[in-house]
Image (cartoon, rainbow, N blue to C red):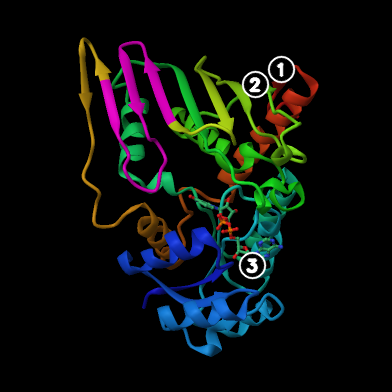
Amino acid sequence: RRIGYAVVGLGSYATRQIMPNFAGCDHARLVALVSGTPAKLDRYGAQYGIPATHRYSYADFDRIRDNPDIDVVYVVLPNAMHAEYSIRAAQAGKHVMCEKPMAISVGECEAMIAACRKAGTRLMIGYRSRFEVHNRLAIDLARGGHVGSTRLITAEHGFPIRPDQWRLDRALSGGGSMMDIGIYSLNAARYLTGEEPVEVSAIDSTDRSDPRFRTVEDRISFLLRFPSGIEANCISSYSSAHNAYRVIGTEGWIDMEPATPYSGHAMRIRKQDAVMPRTLPVPAKNQFAAQLDHLAECVVTGATPIVPGEEGLADMRVIEAIYGSAAERRHVRIGAA
Ligand code: NAD
């Protein structure tokens, strides 16, 4: 039988990207919905054939425990709600898929990992780019020495944010562009090197007179130093439109632009004197379906997902160091505790 998912939070990402892509899955299916808005439960319940018995409000979320059709709870809520709903899902005996950023602090990430470990359930973070073919190729090429040994990575992610959304309210988001979109630059620097950064230096250049940025940051630039000597020079922004990374090696570079969109990835490789485009066909199973199926297969086999809770925790450790470095205006060592 296919592994049954309950989606919690019927906002933009859940309804436009996740729910439609169960159609492309081999091992996962959508079986339940959780929302605070009855009209959304009616609308999406009807659209996806979810019976009334499998539609939940936040108040009766814990009743998912009694529904054997639900194997996995997929948390697609504002960041500050990730920890609570992931932990309640684990306590109900369910496996957890949680959106990025995993939570809003290292302590919350650790509590989520502990709750899933105690319950004996899998925990995976929604790092969809790890299931996307160009990013997978970039990882193989970069780590395989295709352009020599990697010396530098540049990564930049940003979009001009509209006002009036929870992302600009620190109580719900836990932070600004870094938590939301800059995390793609950070995560890419980590997956392209396969290393954990040991030191960070960050500059926050947010214009605090902009009413959007009363409680959260706009632009933050950060430099990561890795054990092998690789440096990653990264940008996170809520006021400029970019989505790219470049791996620069001793013999050339691998360029991805856009690097982490929903679709339309484009890669170029420079080696010796030639620049070659390497745009791959979109596979039948796209990054969203592949991500959903991966956790479903892990649930069946008991394997650990390639992006487990520890991966979200690793990013959160660096994000806290980035914020610390920017606030204190100094280099911060990571993992020195
Ligand atoms: P959204 O605002 O479109 O949806 C959030 C949902 O949470 C809404 O349905 C809203 O009704 C519900 N909600 C419940 N309690 C709420 C409260 N107190 N305040 C505000 N909303 C509340 O947001 P989104 O873009 O769908 O983002 C949801 C999560 O998904 C975030 O963690 C975000 O980082 C993540 N996300 C990931 C990707 C990706 O590519 N992996 C893309 C977009 C969003």
Looking at the image, which residue sits at the far right?
328
Looking at this view, is 154 or 113 the one in front?
154
Q: Marks 1 and 2, how far apart in space?
A: 7 Å
Q: Position of residue 146 (x, y in %)?
A: 28, 22
Relative to 262, does residue 238 appear above or below in the rendering?
above
Disc 1 marks which amino acid? His
Q: Quadrant of the C terminus?
A: top right
Dot 1 falls on a residue whose secondary structure is loop
* Residue that label 2 marks: 199
1 or 2: tag closer to the N-terminus: 2
Residue drawn 31% across the image and 38% down it = 134
Where residue 192 is drawn, which disc sits there? none
Picture quadrant of residue 288: bottom left
Dot 3 falls on a residue whose secondary structure is helix
1 or 3: tag closer to the N-terminus: 3
Disc 2 marks which amino acid? Glu
Query: Magenta span covers which residues?
Result: 244-269
Membership of 270 in magenta stretch: no
Instruction: Please say if the residues under marks 2 and 3 sit with CB atoms less than 8 Å apart.
Output: no
Relative to 277, does residue 46 appear above or below in the rendering?
below
Membership of 256 in magenta stretch: yes
Looking at this view, is 306 or 83 the one in front?
83
Q: Marks 2 and 3, how far apart in space?
A: 34 Å
